[in-house]
């Protein structure tokens, strides 16, 4: 008999906001609004929680989700510390995906590796949010359904 497990992920973080309507003194992020989510702490549980960031179902005892932390913005503002969740996967596959994400984030001209990443994820709707025009990759983590990462 196959038992389907559901687990929930919630991320707590601190928030730092730059000055609104900065005069543009030439320092980092001057001239536009900036917000940063930092010190991410992930809570993973099979117990239902209020307002989870993501919910995943799996038939494995231990499942793994890849969490990509990235920044994004535009002409008039920027926010760092967004999280994109990808999964669930078995352990080996999750770590391979994390490895490919790291590679693609620093060598985004490698269409072969990106194609390998998309094929491994196997989701036709997958979009790498950290690879957008104004986006920037910060880091990737592998989260386990037992609460570790």
Image: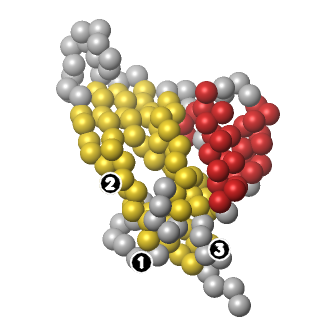
Depth check: 15 or 79 in front? 15
Q: Which residue is mark 3?
A: 60
Residue at 47% in and 35% down: 138
Residue 91 screen position, x and y as percent:
65, 60
- Mark seen at residue 95: none
Residue at 64% in and 50% down: 95
Residue at 50% in and 30% down: 136
Question: Residue furthest toward the top?
Answer: 26
The mark that comes first in sequence, 3 or 2, is 2
Q: Is residue 17 visible?
A: yes
The mark that comes first in sequence, 3 or 1, is 1
Residue at 77% in and 49% down: 119
Q: Quadrant of the image for the N terminus?
A: bottom right
Q: Categorize mark 2 by other alpha carbons within 10 Å: few (<14), some (14-19), many (20+).
A: few
Residue 51 screen position, x and y as percent:
36, 66
The colour style of the image is secondary structure
The mark that comes first in sequence, 2 or 1, is 2
Q: Quadrant of residue 18?
A: top left
Q: Which residue is mark 2?
A: 12
Asked which secondary structure carries label 2, the reply is strand
Residue 57 screen position, x and y as percent:
58, 72
Q: Which residue is mark 1?
A: 47
Mark 2 vs mark 1, CA separation in Å: 17 Å
């Amino acid at each position: 008999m196959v038992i389907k497990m559901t687990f929930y992920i919630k991320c707590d973080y601190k928030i730092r906001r730059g000055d609104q309507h900065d005069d543009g003194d030439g320092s980092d992020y001057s001239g536009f609004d900036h917000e940063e989510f930092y010190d991410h702490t992930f809570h993973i549980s099979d117990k239902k929680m209020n307002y989870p960031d993501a919910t995943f179902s799996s038939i494995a005892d231990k499942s793994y989700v890849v969490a990509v932390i990235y920044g994004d913005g535009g002409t008039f503002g920027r926010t760092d510390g967004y999280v994109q969740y990808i999964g669930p996967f078995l352990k080996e596959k999750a770590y391979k995906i994390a490895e490919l994400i790291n590679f693609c984030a620093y060598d985004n001209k490698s269409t072969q590796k990106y194609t390998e990443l998309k094929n491994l994820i196997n989701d036709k709707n997958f979009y790498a949010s950290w690879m957008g025009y104004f986006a920037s990759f910060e880091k990737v983590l592998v989260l386990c359904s037992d609460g570790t990462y």
